[in-house]
Amino acid sequence: MFHFSRRTLWLIIFVTIPLIVVFNLVGQEEGVVSEVVEPQAWFLDDLAVSTDERAPGRTLWTVDLDQARQLRLTITQDLIPTEQLDIAIDAAVSTSRQGGQFQVTVVNPPDTDALQASVDFLQSWLPDGDSRSVVLSGDLDDDRMAVARRLLEPLLGEGMVNQVAPQPSLARLRSPPMGTNEQLAFLLWVGVLQQRLSGYDPQVRWDHRAETSQVLINQTLSTDLFVPVTEEELEPVRAAYTASAEQRSRSAEQIHRYLVTSAVYDLPADFLVSQQQRLSAITLADVNAARANSQP
């Protein structure tokens, strides 16, 4: 049983009630080899993503991952909970922020009753609001999707507006909107910029918590770093991203994150699956336009 004070619930909360999986038996007989559980993976091109909008601004996103060992459920909304609540569920619970929204994720075993208990908890704890997305992934059936659909109904918790304080940084570059070709060109430009900073041991990190994503850098950026990008500089960065996009196998956790990102930014269901084709369309001129638009 866990208890959280009212003052701290609006901060990022990490509650973990882990499920214990024993891979090796202590004191097993000599010569007995314990079973090795292979990591699960699915091909992006085989995924069937579904959306179900039951009310304006409230949508259920689902993807069926056959024989997945866990059910992942994320609810993302504008409001953040503030009320006290005791939690006694058989799930791992975590919270985060993305795109100016508050998110809470529960990870259950593939059991409908356990999912039902998690939804009961979320429905009691989370505040109601005008817009909300619910993302469910795992080994799904009609009953499990119906349970998750309850989170599109009115919620019972108390809440406040989600506010994101800026993180300290010596330099910050604002990203174009997620889902645009300009954002993808900006992503490649940031890769080139990291190459140019490589001799300075830079810390370059993305902050996706606010509505507008930013790249944070732990040093000031001189104008010399913003000279035009050459094809020779761009090629290794593009090749690295292309090689990653060509790897079509993804874990259940990665697929769930992709779907949550699509829900947060209201992207087409196949947006992150089609990155390989979109990358090939980005030109050197596009990257240099991103560079020019991002100069501090």
Image: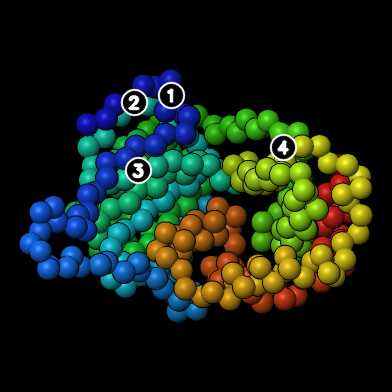
Specify whether 252 is left or right of 235: left
Specify whether 273 is left or right of 1: right
Q: Are marks 1 and 2 in contact (CB under 8 Å)?
A: yes
Q: Amino acid at mark 2?
A: Phe
Q: Which residue is mark 4?
A: 218
Q: Residue at x 47, y 73 (%)?
A: 249
Q: Earlier in the sequence, mark 4 or mark 3?
A: 3
Q: Residue at x 58, y 32 (%)?
A: 163
Task: Look at the numbered disc 2 and give the secondary structure of its residue.
Answer: loop
Q: Which residue is mark 2?
A: 4
Distance, label 3 to label 2, CA atoms, is: 13 Å
44 or 124: nearer the viewer: 44
Q: Earlier in the sequence, mark 1 or mark 4?
A: 1
Distance, label 4 to label 2, CA atoms, is: 34 Å
**Whether residue 131 is situated above or below residue 4 in the rendered picture:** below
Q: Which mark is residue 57?
A: none
Q: Residue at x 27, y 66 (%)?
A: 37
Q: Earlier in the sequence, mark 3 or mark 2?
A: 2
What is the x, y in percent for residue 220? Answer: 81, 37
Q: Earlier in the sequence, mark 4 or mark 2?
A: 2
Quadrant in which the C terminus is drawn: top right
Res. 24 in view: yes
Specify whether 33 is left or right of 229: left
Q: Amino acid at mark 4?
A: Asn
- Outermost front residue: 30
Q: Which residue is mark 1?
A: 8
Task: Look at the numbered disc 3 and give the secondary structure of its residue.
Answer: strand
